[in-house]
Image: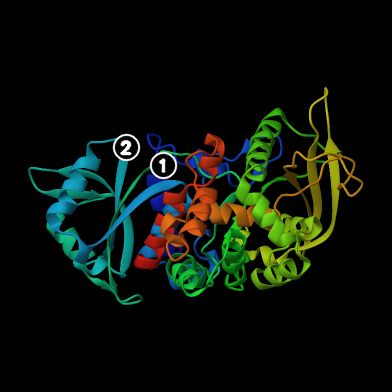
Amino acid sequence: MPPVVAAAKRLLQAATSLPLQIAPAVMQQRASVSGGGPWRWFVESMLDCCEPLEKVKDKDISFGKVVCLAQCAGANVEAFRANQSTIDEFRRYVVSCSTSYDCHVISSYHRGAFNQTGTGHFSPIGGYDAGKDMALILDVWVPLTLLWKAMSIVDEATGLHRGFMLVSRRQRASSLLHTLSCKHESWVSTAKYLMDDLPVLLSSNDVKDVKHVISTVFKSLPSDFAEFIKWVAEVRRQEEGGQGVSQEEKERVAIKEEVLKQVEETGLYKHVTDILSSEKSSCQIKQTIGLRDSLPNIAASVCCQGAGFLTGKLGLADRFCCRETGVRCYMANGDKPVTVVSGTVVNSNGEQGVDMVVPLSQKEPNCCSVGSCGYSVVHPASNDILTALLLALPPQAWMGIKDYEVLQDMSGLVSTEKLPHLLQEEVPISLIFSQMNYILNFS
């Protein structure tokens, strides 16, 4: 096993230990196996959310990307580089976490300080001996002062110091419908635009109303924005003869549909829809940011990723080709229908049937409905994704608006204080932007 992959796995072993119970939280966002609900354990193919797995195996993984990986896995992370902390602070955290079930310390150090072969390594700290001032870096006791020295050695690949991170259980649930992806290199420009450039852009434009503000934000988004914010899809293997929809799947879909309903009921969503309904604006914005609302195209892409995941080859999902997709609708005992999009995915080793469970909007039936469900499949739609983005931006993003009344109107539209609890959980502002700040500062 490549050392960097082994290190990432050891990090996840710490993050998924029984007291923290982080694994089930992230698994709600990953593929499910037929009839069995979400997976409850990590596998190697899940280590790709911040860097393509093949690149990790080939070139190494940085301290910042491991921070990203832990965040992506559903953990709360606080990171420290050795030159930005002190040995006394490090010792306090080691002592605290060694006597608590609520956190873990993970160190990033240079093996050379211990006369070991190799260079960088990551290890959870499993204990502390106060009498000897020694730390247990699984499975070896070492002097804490020597460990600090090993963490202070600069990483030649990044030119930055190594360090340590505190990993704890996240106090709020992970988002159900959307997540951020740092796999595509363009995420840096998107994060910089949202956090740094947007306030300047709004201050330099004489925006006259909220629609002008929103349109300005959308039209200036980086071209690869669609690679940054992703729909969380649930996929499963197809079984011969079909398998219907389990009660657990129905319950998860119902929650997602309620979140969609709450998004559509916001005043912000109505403004976004009006802007995208304008033929000129819609074409320009969608072409700029690369968002696609075509369910067949989305289904083909998701089914290929699902096939890669289910076969343990997630990093090679682009080598799968979706031959066909179809839509089935399940309804039982008067329940609301559940839509399942099926795809047949092929590669050099044969074919794999993959299902994707799709939440529906609460709109009335219409003649353009997909399949026989009588509901419009509107997720993942541009309106939904862009509304979620605006709700997730921190308040300071709008401080560049010069007109006080426009600023007040915009601040009222994006305020999350009065949103339903479920929708507040879907838009974890502090988590989203703390994650971006960590990755930008620690990569």
Residue type, mark 1 in image: Arg
Element carrying mark 2: loop
Residue type, mark 2 in image: Asp
Identify the image quadrant of residue 265: top right
Contact (CB < 8 A) between labels 2 and 1? Answer: no
Residue beneath disc 2: 102
Give percent across and percent down for residue 190.
Answer: 52, 69
Judged from this view, the residue extending furthest toward the top is 333
Q: Earlier in the sequence, mark 2 or mark 1?
A: 2
Residue 202, which numbered label?
A: none
The figure's colour scheme reads rainbow
Instruction: Give whichever of 405, 226 is nearer the camera.
Output: 405
Give percent across and percent down for residue 399.
Answer: 42, 62
Residue beneath disc 1: 170
- The mark lying in front, picked from 2 and 1, is 1
Give percent across and percent down for residue 64.
Answer: 38, 64
Residue 30 visible? The answer is: yes
* Residue at x 78%, y 47% (from the top left corner): 377
